[in-house]
Image (cartoon, grey):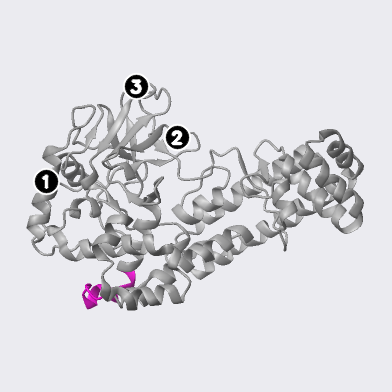
Amino acid sequence: MKFILLLSILDAAAAFTSPFRPTPIITTTKHPNHDHRLYSTYDTDYSETTLIDIDEEAPRDIPSMEAWSYEMGAQRTDGFALTTDDGGYNVYAMTNVDLPTGSPILTIPEHMILSSNKAMAELRTSDMSEAEKIVKSVNAESEFRHYYLMLKLLVEYEKGMESPWYQWMNSLPRYYTNAASMTPFCCLCLPSLMRKLTVQERGYLQRLGVSSIKMVPYLNEDTKYDVDLCTWVYQIVYTRSFETADGDLKIVPLADMFNHGAYPEVESSYDEEGNYYAYTTYDVPAGSPLRMSYGDPTNPSFLFARYGFLDESTEATFCKIIPEHINKDMEELGYAHNRMLFYKDGNVSEEVWDILLFQHVSSTKIGDKRALMEAHRSGDYATKQMLHEKYYENTSAMLLEHLESFLEQLEKLSSKAGERQTELGDHPRLPLILAHNEFVKQTFLAVRMQNFGY
């Protein structure tokens, strides 16, 4: 049955037609810093084992994945290439030629795509009730789509080279720097919001890990109790799957090499048959990366927690004002992580000032609180401005207090992390955590300078 499945997929690849027929490019763009992690050869000897090596230092076989994607029917434009700046840990897509707006970049046929809908149709059998019961008992039912994608990857991992996705899985990263990969000490070096997100991400891993996977009837015992393996497939699913309009979660091989960009060069779409298409969103000059959006660029803490990178290109970041209680009035005024912003140039979003004003008048001037909400709902800008001017001395003092206290907190956290930098073998993510804290610090300093002159 395994070979029948593989043959059916290859038949589908042969039958697949694309709206464009670019010349396939099978060679990977080499970088001066490349090493063994990226550039393994096509004729790698797999005779000793058919299982993928998931050690953090294991090589990523990118060339074999590229050859496989072509054989499976993937199409890519002239100039599309994969490259690396760090010796192979991060491999990403770029273009070697100028691409005008609307240029097709990739077409990936449906049979290559892994999806939660297909995984659940295949693997959600009647004897999965015990495993699902455990997932439900830890309030992780909302993560069933991710869970079944993880199980799909484990099933394919057990097949070794007989899996149609073997070459793709063997090209994936083993080393991650996101929240799920951090040590408990790393978490102690993060500011409040980032720590909260880290605990949340690590919670997903704990709830969907060995404790529930060990009850899956069709996995072998070695797989069920392999914590490192379960963590690896968790990382693949949570960092490479994206939700489509119909609620499906999809992992698109080759397209999963698009990095994140605050101003993405790539727009993705699917046709009625489920085939994937990527097009340029604007004129992209040769030598540029090809990037998509992983989420709100004004929330770099989430991007760091989920994906493990620091997006320093973002113009703004969440201001880190986190009240104990957030009521409906505050949400109406704009309390949200993507609206309560500090900008790198030192400016502060209107929503921050509105929330500070609301907090002040809520405890001192109930009549002015009502006036603020009425003015906001009716679009009475003049009244809102009058209230802001009336209480500016108070709200600016609140802002300064927040800036000073958070900067002090960052200094303590970074000092704690710096003291352990000599122990990078135990805490290898500390340099990135320090970079995150420094990025936030510089934004807060810019706001203080812009608003208070020092």
Q: Earlier in the sequence, mark 2 or mark 3?
A: 3
Q: What type is the residue that disc 1 sits on?
A: Leu
Q: x and y percent of residue 166 in the render?
A: 19, 55
Q: Is residue 420 visible?
A: no
Q: Earlier in the sequence, mark 1 or mark 2?
A: 1
Eye-nearest disc, 1 or 2 = 1
- From which residue to which does the magenta span run? 217-228
Q: Quadrant of residue 205?
A: bottom left
Disc ID at residue 10: 1
- Measured Cα–Cα span from mark 1 to mark 2: 32 Å
Q: Secondary structure at mark 3?
A: loop
Please report the residue visible at 69 percent of the width from the left and 59 percent of the height from the top: 409
Quadrant of the frame with the C terminus: top right
Q: CA distance from mark 2 to mark 3?
A: 16 Å
Callout 1: helix, strand or loop? helix
Type of the residue with mark 2: Pro
Residue neighbourhood size for the residue with mark 2, other residues' Cα within 10 Å, grouped as few (<14), some (14–19), many (≥20): some
Camera-side residue of 156 and 94:
156
Instruction: Say which residue appears at 72% left-offset and 43% top-offset.
Output: 351
SS under mark 2 = loop
Quadrant containing the N terminus is bottom left
- Residue labelled with disc 2: 264
Q: Any magenta on residue 335?
A: no
Which residue: 78% across, 44% down?
Answer: 353
Residue where numbered disc 3 is placed: 98
Above or below, comparing residue 403 to residue 209 in the picture = above
The number of callouts visible is 3
Amino acid type, callout 3: Asp
Q: Would residue 362 be found to the left or right of residue 205 on screen?
A: right
